[in-house]
Image (spheres, rainbow, N blue to C red):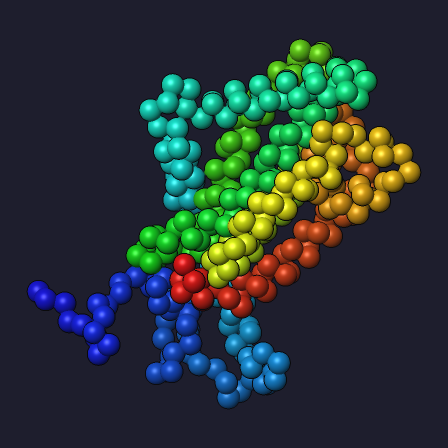
Amino acid sequence: MPVKRNRLGRMPVFGTSSMPLDQPSTRGAGKDALGMTNKRIGTSGSQTPSSGLTSNERKSRASLAIADMASAARQRRLWLRLGWNDIMQRYRRSVLGPLWLTVSMAIMIVSLGLLYAQIFQSRIDDFLPYLCVGFLVWGYFSSFLTEAGLLFVGSETYIKQIKLPYALYVCRGTWSKVIIFAHNFVIYLGVMAYFHNSPGANALLAVPGFVLLTINGALVTLFIGMASARFRDIPQVIGSLVQILFFITPIMWKSDQLKDRTLIVDWNPFYHLIQIVRDPLLGDIPTAATYVVVITMTLINLVVVGLFFGRFRERISYWV
């Protein structure tokens, strides 16, 4: 059966993501992919001159954003499978598969640990575990920043052809990074066993720290992913900034080496994100300042990214 062209001479586009169902319709009320009423509201709410949105429209956008995240959570079997497939596809037909990540990371940690322990005149049994945990945690969090630019752009085919919540792509990428971190965590166990170090019960504090680290990484991924879909230069800028952040964050050096110039560390949020996981894994308890900074940062990211996602979520399919 021949497909009719529209009045502009273009082929009709299938899939709701290319034409978001939550896009306000000028023809009246409708239902979106999440089953929520999608109608132009503008007569009963109070008008906001700055944004042109009524209070009811703001609530509708926020409700759609929350429903998008809830729908992604319900489809966890799908993004768990997609995340695992991403890793398997990257190392298909290789001999060691995903273990190549562990091997390359182990070689780099041991090499740099031996070198910088000599440069800083530090004990190898103290410096190498510190460097190992710092590298693992930094590599985990920096992957959120460096790969966020392709979050929606790299999923253009899915977005334009399959009706899926946008938050599902964030969950998919986050799950892939958790799997890679689990692979690399074997290096930490090997280093601690070699030097006969045991973090004790304090290691349990690394679990809530890792959860906070992951939440911040997922929120940052969503924000950068949306911004990169609109402005394609952002991934290059983020890549350059990550390199600078790596050198000004205490990963290959210790904060006490700065002596009285501790502002570089105290006002560095990435230091606290690393420290909230690194300290427990080394047998120490993170400071109260670290917990305050990370929890405050998490709350701010939840509000800012949530508002940004609710405001521009419907434009993602047009940007990719």
- Seen in the picture, residue 120 relative to 11 is either above or below; the reply is above
- Seen in the picture, residue 247 relative to 103 is either above or below; the reply is below
Left or right of residue 61, residue 1 in this image: left
Q: Which of 190 and 123 is in front in this view?
A: 123
Q: Which residue is drawn at 59% across and 36% down?
A: 140
Left or right of residue 145, residue 64 in this image: left
Q: Where is residue 308 in the image (x, y as percent from the top left)?
A: 57, 63
Q: Where is residue 155 in the image (x, y as percent from the top left)?
A: 39, 50
Count of marks overlaid on the render: 0
Q: Which residue is drawn at 34% across and 83% down?
A: 27
Q: Which residue is drawn at 58% across and 85% down?
A: 47
Q: Position of residue 255 (x, y in %)?
A: 81, 33
Can residue 63 be seen in this snapshot?
A: no
Q: Quadrant of the N terminus?
A: bottom left
Q: Residue at x 70, y 25 (%)?
A: 131
Residue projecting furthest to the right:
260
Q: Quadrant of the C terminus?
A: bottom left
Residue projecting furthest to the bottom:
43
Q: Position of residue 171 (x, y in %)?
A: 48, 46
Residue projecting furthest to the left:
1
Q: Which of 315 and 33 is in front in this view?
A: 315
Which corner quadrant of the image does residue 202 belong to? Answer: top right
Left or right of residue 91, residue 138 in this image: right
- Seen in the picture, residue 209 relative to 98 is either above or below; the reply is below
Q: Which of 131 and 23 is in front in this view?
A: 131
- Seen in the picture, residue 140 relative to 44 is either above or below; the reply is above
Can residue 316 be seen in this snapshot?
A: yes
